[in-house]
Image (cartoon, rainbow, N blue to C red):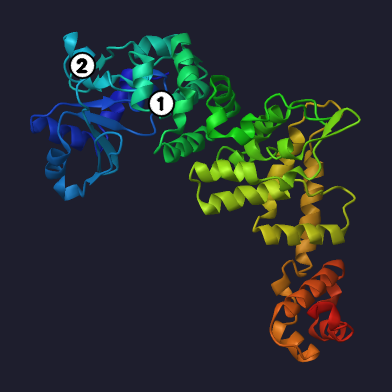
Amino acid sequence: MRSPSDILENIQVQTPVSNILETLWTSGYQAFLAGGAVRDALLGIAPEDVDILTNALPDDLAWLFADQDPKYVGKSFAVTLVDKVEVATCRPADKKAVAEGHTFPATDLGRRDLTINSMVWDPKTRTLADPFGGQADIETKTIRFTRDPFDRIEEDPVRMVRACRFAARFGFKIEPKAFDAICAQAHKITAQGTADRIQREIIKAMGMDKPSGFFNLLHDTGLLLYILPSLDRCYGLDGGPHHGETVFEHNLLVGDALPASMPTLRLAGFLHDTGKKDALEIKEGRNTFPGHQKFTQAMLDDLERLRFSKKDMDYIYALVRGHMRPLKADTTARAVRRLLAMLDDLNLSYQDFLRMRIADKKSNLNPVKKPYTLGDIRLRLGKILDTMNEQTAFNINDLDISGRDIQDVLGLPQGPAIGKVKAFLFEKVLDDPSLNQKKTLADLVRQMDRNDFTD
């Protein structure tokens, strides 16, 4: 295993990092490798991103790197993007650190969120600056706020979500004082301007091996109630006779079972059964959830509040609405055609439909329920592909007759009646694809009673 110093030295000699460091040093500024890169190196992980901390101001950086089209991207604090490397200008000095005799970079690190993110590597001296015990916390697998947790949360409430994400990502425990502070301040997560950043934290969490740990921590700290109340309300809700786990547990199992490379699909898995709370009916003393896939409003309200794009919301909605459509060994070709028509209407691929179905089937702790075998999956995929190869109509616009043709046959003007006729013909074609021929469809139109479509 490579040592942390080897990992960091390998980073500092890479371009453009080495060029940025040398330019800052020769211009009389201090510059260090900071934050996540140092943390990951101490964990033995090759950092994905590199941050540089400097005492140069954004105007200085703009002048020094004018030929590299630097971009100021800072929001919470000053960050300049130089050749895709984030160069952070030191924040206003941490007064407590100054009072204790600290100088830069410790005066900046005292304002950072977590101790494991409050370290820098000095490439010149090959030494680690760790004034708040981040290395020790890594060794003891502890998530701790830098200095006073209430101060850090007051400065930025999203740090509470980050603490949960890092704890779940690395399998660390949140230090008791930090945990209590999050519980006490959880309501502040609704502060204005945090929605986009909370969304990014959620999406980052989807890349973990098991994001369920993240959602469990959000629930345990009280944050989930404010971030995704549609999911939080499923905690402890009995899953009914067909499940051996609660609805909350089932959502988490399904999300974990979906691929980390598809974050929006995975998030849909964590939310797919949140409608069960609204659909709940008790029959013979047991919970049932008829039509729960139709109860999507609470989930959509959460996603909209977190400023997810319409594209992402439509995709998650489609996965939730479609996940209960049966596809079994004895499913008829007619039923498969109707399934594909539904997927076409939802703008959802059969691949993602199957991914959700497989994860849903797998994530059931009822011993009677079994996940799909490879043979089961191949059978279902074969049914879909065989039906698709028939080249039948899966969309009303695939009919071999136009609205103009229908107008001519019925002698009707353009209007809602024509749409009703096309919908009727589409249902007929789904039942029997051989009917999708212009002459046959025109004959069916002639047999219709105009009054059925013009009322």
Mark 2: amino acid: Lys
Mark 1: which amino acid?
A: Arg
SS class of the residue under badge 2? helix
**N-term-proximal mark, 1 vs 2:** 2
Which dot marks residue 295? none
Task: Tell me, yes or no, if residue 352 can be seen here.
Answer: no
Q: Nearer the viewer, residue 171 or 163?
A: 163
Say which of 288 and 39 sits in front. 288
> For residue 159, which numbered disc appears in the image?
1
Q: Determine the secondary structure under disc 1.
A: helix
| Relative side of 175 to 24, left or right | right
Image coords of residue 57 (percent x, y): 15, 35
**Residue at horizontal 72 percent and vertical 39 percent from the top:** 278
Crowdedness near tag 2: few (<14), some (14–19) or many (≥20) residues, C-alpha within 10 Å: some
Question: Is 271 left, or right, of 187 in this rendering?
Answer: right
Q: What is the distance, in whole Å, between disc 1 and disc 2 at their CAs? A: 20 Å
Residue 95 is labelled as 2
